Image (tube, coloured by chain):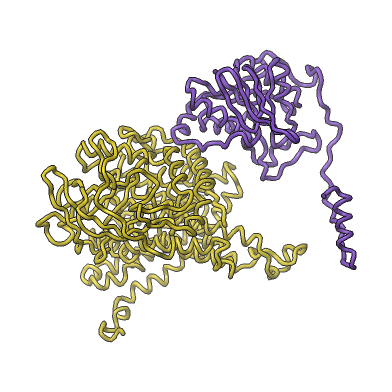
Amino acid sequence: MKIVVLAKQVPDTWSHRALDMVTGLLDRSASEHVPDEINERTTEAALQYKDSAPAAEVIILSMGPEDATATLRKMLSMGADAAVLVTDPALAGSDAVQSARVLSAALEKVGADLILAGNRSTDGQCGVVPAMVAELLGQALAPCLDSVTITESSIEGQVQVEGASLTVRAELPAVATLTEKAAEPRFPNFKNIVAAKKKPIVTWSLADLGIQAGPASAPVQSVMVSAQERPEKQPGPKISDDGTAAAQLAEFLTANRLV
Amino acid sequence: MPDYHPPVQDMEFLLNEVLDVSSLAEFPGFEGVEADLVSSTIEHFGAFAAQEIAPLNEVGDREGSVATPDGVVTASGFAKAYQSYVDGGWPALGCREEDGGHGMPGFMRTILEEMLGGSNLAFAMAPMTAPGAYEVIKHSASDELKERFIPKIVSGEWLTAMSLTEPQCGSALGLLRTRAVPQDDGSFRITGTKMFNSWADHDMTANIVHLVLARLPGAPEGTKGISLFLVPKFLVTSDGAIGERNAFSVSSVEKKLGIHGSPTCVTNFDGATGYLLGTPHRGMASMFIIMNAMRLASGVCATGVADAAYRNALTYTHERLAGRSITGAKSPELPGDPIIVHPDVRRMLMTQRATVEGGRAFGFWVSVNLDLAERHPDPVEQKKHDDLVSLLTPVVKSFLTDKGFESADLALQCFGGHGYIRENGAEQYLRDIRMLRLGEGTSGIQAMDFIGRKVVGDEGYVLGRYFSTIRDSIKTLDDEGLLEIADHLRQALDQIEQLTREELPRWSSNREGMAAASLDFMNMIGYLSLGYMWARMAATASRKLRVSDGDATFLSNKIRTARFFFSYLMPDIQALAQRVRSGIHDVMGIPVDEFV
């Protein structure tokens, strides 16, 4: 059983995050970069299966700049077996479609029985890449699982939708996305911290995957039309109590759909 | 309640840059010690301490550990958190690989000790005896005992506790009364009452291994007639399984100022089964292996608590608005400026910062020297490092706990009245850290050990060599262009060396005068030691800045804090020197019978 966890390096949510106003892309120099927290939860779900079936292999796959290896090392310290980083100058500013194409190519090369991903990242927040990967690989997608049970041949979990809780199940191979409720990540133990230093992090370029990327080779692509700073926040209206303050407040809340 | 912010960047700078600990990797047994392993340990254990241990700090204070008829029950969450600590493999960090440990140098454990101390001192006390107990059992127990106990202590499945103090004797262990009577099977029956037993009983581990000082029949009077025994809470069968309950019990848990989460027990041994460790009547020497480890850990933990208190105060001074900056409003859009703009607040913060970061460096440096004393391949070098650690252990213990307490007091002061109430956590830090100035020998006891045994005892030889080490480091400061810092350190060193030359012969002939001067003189060595550390940190920061290697803000502020230490804190040695020179006359002036 080979479980591949999709991971992503993101700007620290707690730091100042900025876009480059010329390219519309993330300004990587503006903030510290950390593994997206959901990656640790997804890795935990995979490791819990590995705890019960030690022969299982957990591989972390990421696409990103060269320094994203630090992100991968954290997941290796938790107990994952190996990591793969797809990095290539042509991948800078990839949109969701291109990311999904590249990850799918890498996944075919790795050969996964089960692909786990967070339901969405804290930076782009699109939440569509895993679904695109499932589509490209022709596999089932079990989306937004709040809990997860993995067996040798299937994955099952609970999905909350408006007014109902669904149990979804997919036969492997399959892709599943997990919410932050799915697992509480473990702290790396010292043995794994030491072991992580010796675990392999393989780096693949586009040439290694035998594919091309960039505008010329994209069948469809998102195009950044313009970028501008978020406008300064305007002060809200002030209500002076002339006896009608309660009514004015209620009106304000209703008008802004806050109640 | 405050969050704990592990000092990741500062520890990495200190260990990987200033002390360059990866150079230890050339010594046998330390091959795996690399900078990135040190960084990973700091980062991961810091996250663990902040997220798992620190949230229990206030819980432990509020609930305390409680004595019940079934034994001591710890505060909510403590047992689970300890299990996470065990699952992390942290108890085995410094134990030898042949015993199932990770074989890491002791300074790696120092990282854990500071972070546990800073996140939750009461919790940090629980595993504090284990490293020393492991060493003692490893080197003085029979093979059979080792087989039964060492693996469980290494894994952390069983915790250890230390039983020295009795109601009638603490520092003067020569008055100890607990008896050990030999049995036909080679074991001993231990009978007596012990007190101030930290973590003597609890619900965190299935068994607890006590190391108990007691007298054999016919033992000589005084400390030369004390033996050391291993007394488990539950007897252990030859196949390693837990057997019957041993004959001792905790009769009460002390009510006390701080560290409420740490049970301070009164323990009654009623013919409990114990096993002799090492040679009869030589128990004190073994006990001092544990004691010295605990003394270093106390200083390190004090730095941890002072750091946590400082960070808590720092956050508050950025948020609390009061008055306007004396040079004009700094935040005109707000109803007042944050209090960090005020010079008096800044003075308090800088004092804490210089104390904490300097203390951290001193504790880690001595810890690294202890590793060199144990593993340096050249016996001459080994002896030098051992002598240095022996000289400085009482300084680490007393100076870092005393100054850590003063620092935590300044942290509280930054809150004004809001520090005195429970809500902000500042008063708990102050109550908790206070204990560290008492346990494992008070500061006064440390000072007597320092001046009597370590300085006068060898006629100042090792201290003189320490002075030379510091003098050699000044050249690096000159080379870096840190002339002002170099001058400060040189002047302090000159002054202390001269004072030592003058006073040493007098102390040899006037023991009471020596005792009167002991704490002040040791504090001078404390300031000098922190000065030496600040000089090394400033020189490293300067070198890295010169080649644009690293976080320029962090490095520049290291040098600024070093300057503050020398201009603002180091001058305290003038007053200390004057007190040392003033001699004994005025201290002992009032006769005892008139001192009412």
**Nearest the eye: B245 or A20:** B245
Note the chain letter of the purple one: A
Does residue B566 appear anywhere in the picture? no
At 49% across and 47% down in the image, what residue appears? Answer: B11
Could you tell me residue B441's position as x and y percent?
A: 32, 61
Would you place residue B149 above or below residue B406 in this image? Answer: above
Does residue B500 appear anywhere in the picture? yes
Would you place residue A71 above or below residue B179 in this image? Answer: above
**Position of B428 compared to A23: left or right?**
left
Q: Which residue lies furthest to the bottom in this view?
A: B594
The image quarter in which residue B579 lies = bottom left
Could you tell me residue A145's position as x and y percent?
A: 66, 30
Q: Quadrant of the C terminus of chain B?
A: bottom left
Could you tell me residue B219's position as x and y percent?
A: 12, 57
**Position of A56 compared to A21: left or right?**
left
At 81% across and 23% down in the image, what residue appears? Answer: A221
**Position of A97 compared to B301: left or right?**
right
**Position of A117 compared to B7: left or right?**
right
Could you tell me residue B315's position as x and y percent?
A: 61, 58
- Chain B shade in the render: yellow
Q: How many labels does the image show?
A: 0
